[in-house]
Amino acid sequence: MTPAVRVDHVSRRYHGVTAVDEASFALEEGRIHGLLGRNGAGKTTLMRLVTGLDRPTSGSVEVFGSDPFENEAVLRRTCFVKESQTYPDLSVTRVLASARLLQPAWDENLARLLVADFDLPLGRRVRKLSRGMRSALGIVIGLASRAPLTLFDEPYLGLDAPSRALFYDRLLADFAEHPRTVVLSTHLIDEVANLLERVVVVDHGRVVIDAESDEVRGTAYTVVGPAGPVAEFVSRREVVARQDVGVYSSATVRGRLDEPERRHADELRLDLSPVSLQELVAHATHRGPDDTPTPEGGTR
Amino acid sequence: MIDDGSPIFRQIAARIAGEILDGTLAEEAQVPSTNEFAAIHRINPATAAKGVNELVDAGVLYKKRGIGMFVATGARERLLAERRARFTTEYLEPLVREAARLGIHPDELHRLVTEQEVTA
């Protein structure tokens, strides 16, 4: 199957700063992907490259089989909801009307439903909207566009938890009826973990994880208990984090556990807990004080 | 969903199996669609489908083309047999281990189990 997006050995440098460093990954059509990583890891730059707002310094980007840069045919099938998107100072109605003109797959009924869901004041000018309302407007446009490739970059600044839950519900419901390629970039990883079929994690501009999210889950666990037994249990494993509090220890180790190992842990009276996707990403993108800077002299 | 670290599709499969075991889903009854499972549990529809398909592969559910997914006849018996096979490792062994830790003599444990049966 042709992927919707193919990023092949892409680097993007700005005045000696490497924002994206030899990144390669493919996003298959009809799936919800997570593009995860810390602030400044290169997520937004990657999305700008994929949506033709920027060009790679080296390497190639293909969207639906073509270079997206200044490519009208590709861009009409793409909707990019940016973090703190700015809009011309029009009323909400006018902004939605312009979005409809730009998005051939736009669904006006869905837009109306979402406007009601998020309580958006149609007559109000965008400049007078609260931050959360502006985010909601972006979400309405992103979902109602039904664009074959829809990217959301931290779409919910200023939105409270119930509104975010509403976004997840509407996204899932509409995606189920109209499957398309969705990219969610967010730092609220635990909230979206179960929505994602695949995750791409970037760090220092590099792809450090590119896998099914169900495969990533369960690839690490935390062992808690008396220091001695914990040390014994983790002795032949890769420990990614460790904390000692008095006579107790907590160690996060990479790998999967089988039944006999679980029983062994129980016999040693150790508590085992799964490591969430959020923590896994944190471990994969850990920056300790002894981290050496990249040869280019660091990343943003 | 309860996060025990197992893949979500497996948790979905276990949940459906549990509902068949306790009779919430009767044999030959239609089960919710994968999109409904996805919406209720707020998970990716492909993940829900994977969980459902695992039960299809195990012969617990079957597809009627164009209509939906149904509980197979004999599914409950099959699931019961499977659970009984796992009962010793999953319940009995931890119970006996904990009893030993607490210094509960096997005779005492036996008495406790019998009492439970009466009150249950």
Image (cartoon, helix red, strand yellow):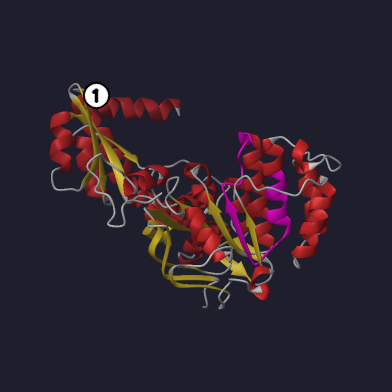
Q: In the picture provided, is A114 more to the left or to the right than B108? A: right
Counting from the top left corner in percent of width and height, residue A158 is at: 63, 36
Counting from the top left corner in percent of width and height, residue A236 is at: 14, 48
Q: Is residue B13 visible?
A: no
Rendering quarter of residue B65: bottom right
Counting from the top left corner in percent of width and height, residue A262 is at: 25, 43
Q: Which residues are magenta?
A: A136-161
At a point 36% along the width and 42% down the height, the residue shown is A275
Q: Residue furthest front?
A: A15
Is A44 within the magenta?
A: no
Counting from the top left corner in percent of width and height, residue B8 is at: 46, 51
Question: Mark 1: which amino acid?
Answer: Glu
Q: Is residue A61 above or below residue A233?
A: below
Q: Is residue B40 visible?
A: yes
Which residue corresponds to mark 1? B108
At a point 33% along the width and 49% down the height, the residue shown is A284
Q: Is residue A282 above or below residue A181?
A: above
Q: In the picture provided, is A279 more to the left or to the right than B50? A: left
Is A156 within the magenta?
A: yes
Pointer 1 local density, CA inside 10 Å: few below 14, some 14–19, many at least 20: few
At a point 72% along the width and 50% down the height, the residue shown is A140
